[in-house]
Image (tube, rainbow, N blue to C red):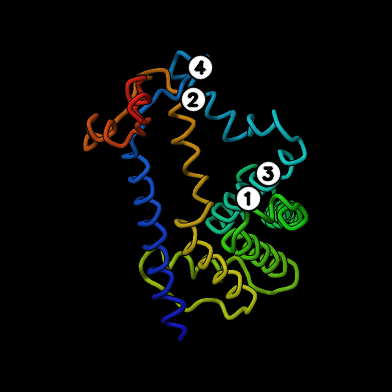
Amino acid sequence: MNVFFGWVVPYIIFAIFLSGIVNRMLVWSHVPVPFKLTVFFGPQTMRGACADLAKETIGFRSLWRGKKGLWFISWLFHISLASILIGHIVGIAFLGQQFTKFGVSAEQSESLSVMLGTYAGVAFLMGVMLLFIRRVASKKMRFISNFGDYLVLVLLLGIAGSGMYMRSLDNVTYLEVATYLKGLISLNPVPPPSSVAFLLHFNLVQLLLLYFPSSKLMHSCGIFFTRWLITRPYERQVIINEHTSSDSFRSKRHKAPEPISNSDREAS
């Protein structure tokens, strides 16, 4: 069972996760756009288009113009999530010693890594809880929500909770986790840590990755498609799939009924 769930399953899930994302992006890239999307003043240079995309993806500018409370919850959730992902990659790669590059001792580096990770984890847990409360408390949100929306939030709560427990109360070390993950990456897998908290945390992450390509979480990739369509400084003309001709669009247009002439009225 350790070999199957610790060595085989992670590769299967990663393959499904990666192929699912690539497939969705390929589908999006071939969707025809039969009308101009840029109907307002937009950036005229590539630098301006990239700056506009950065403002939207980092600062959530369009959401800021709407509800400030929702903007804060979303920003807190996404920024803390990004910090956790970066912290996991750097912390595990350097075994918590990354801050020694700035002249601090090994003990101080590990303590600082734990402290920053804890703060990011608390912020992430707060963001997920606020999003869950908003979805449950709002009648409009409950109406438009489906099972998948709640499943994602429950998985995120489980991941955040198990991660905080593992960091605060469990005795799993950086070395154990790094050895296991580096073994998977190098295609030379080793047995996973025996920590129950780590196994729960790791399996919940795998479930989230498995569901990711078919969930609304794909907006993290889709935003680059949608924003680029309306902000790019070139080729603002109509985009039509090469497999789709104008005749097919014409055949699908709704045709209004022919008006009844006076002669027809008199005949009837």
Question: Residue 179: x, y in percent?
Answer: 50, 69
**Mark 3 closeness class: few <14, some 14–19, many ≥20 residues within 10 Å:** some
Q: Which residue is mark 3?
A: 74
Is there CB contact under 8 Å for labels 3 and 1? no
Between discs 1 and 4, the one toward the N terminus: 4
Which of the two residues, 152 or 37, is positioned nearer the viewer here? 37
Eye-nearest disc, 3 or 2: 3
Eye-nearest disc, 3 or 1: 3
**Residue 199 higher or lower than 53, as above or below:** below
Considering the numbered disc 4 on the image, is that residue within a helix, a strand or a loop? loop
Between discs 1 and 2, the one toward the N terminus: 2
Considering the numbered disc 2 on the image, is that residue within a helix, a strand or a loop? helix
Eye-nearest disc, 2 or 4: 4
Which of the two residues, 145 or 253, is positioned nearer the viewer here? 253
Q: Which residue is mark 4?
A: 42
Question: Residue 57: x, y in percent?
Answer: 57, 35
Q: Which residue is mark 1?
A: 81
Taking 38 as reference, is 174 left or right?
A: right
Which of the two residues, 145 or 43, is positioned nearer the viewer here? 145
Q: Amino acid at mark 2?
A: Cys
Between discs 2 and 4, the one toward the N terminus: 4
In terms of image quadrants, where is residue 246?
top left
Question: Which numbered dot is residue 19?
Answer: none
